[in-house]
Image (tube, rainbow, N blue to C red):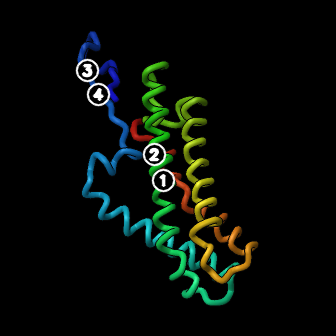
Amino acid sequence: MRRYYKTPYEPKGLMKVFNMGFHPTFLYIFPMLWFYSLPFNFLVDSIVLLIGFKIFGKQKVWHNWRKSILLSWLFGYAADITAAFLMLAFEFAAGAMFHTSVMANPFSGPGQFLCTLFAVLLAGFLIYIFNAKVALRKTELDDKAKRKVALLMAIVTMPFPFFMPVMF
């Protein structure tokens, strides 16, 4: 997305400076970061699942982890990617209609903040649904414990870095 800004070192502000959103699209711009992002997400999802199983399941922690980690990790990543595409849609719409950026600084206005909040909450909702209905289905937990573990996963693994400004 191209943005034109007046620069302080050009008297008339004629120099073009381009701004490109970073965090939701960094995996597409820097494909080598997939190798770091995938194992990091797997590690975080594993830790949160193990904590959730220890707190709410209290028995067969590793057995339940083995039955659910792969689906939880994949569906969590799919939810994050869905939220990133939604953020891109917000970015393009904001740039076309209002000549502003949602991803540059989500705290620069109420519209930018609400768009980012909606994308993050959508990702959290999808993570909860995917975990409660699909990933934790084969575990040996009762339904109440499955919902609690799914809620813990959703709250802790939501893509909160979307709120991080890429331009100050």
Q: Give residue 96's mark.
A: none
In the picture of the structure, the residue carrying the numbered disc 2 is 84
In the rendered view, tell whether residue 120 sits above or below residue 50: above
| Gap between marks 3 and 2 measured at Cα | 27 Å
In the picture of the structure, the residue carrying the numbered disc 1 is 80
Residue type, label 4: Phe
For the residues bearing labels 4 and 2, Cβ distance under 8 angstroms: no
Mark earlier in primary sequence (4, 1): 4
| Gap between marks 4 and 2 measured at Cα | 21 Å
Q: Give residue 18's mark.
A: 4
Q: Residues within 10 Å of mark 4 (few under 14, many from 20)?
A: few
User: Could you tell me which secondary element the residue under label 4 belongs to?
Assistant: loop
Q: Position of residue 125 (x, y in %)?
A: 62, 53
| Gap between marks 4 and 1 measured at Cα | 26 Å
User: Could you tell me which secondary element the residue under label 1 belongs to?
Assistant: helix
At x 46%, y 59%, the residue is: 77
Left-right relation of 21 to 162: left
For the residues bearing labels 1 and 2, Cβ distance under 8 angstroms: yes
In the picture of the structure, the residue carrying the numbered disc 3 is 16
In the rendered view, tell whether residue 68 sits above or below residue 134: below
Q: Position of residue 51 (x, y in %)?
A: 60, 77
Rendered-image quadrant of the C terminus? top left
Q: Residues within 10 Å of mark 3 (few under 14, many from 20)?
A: few
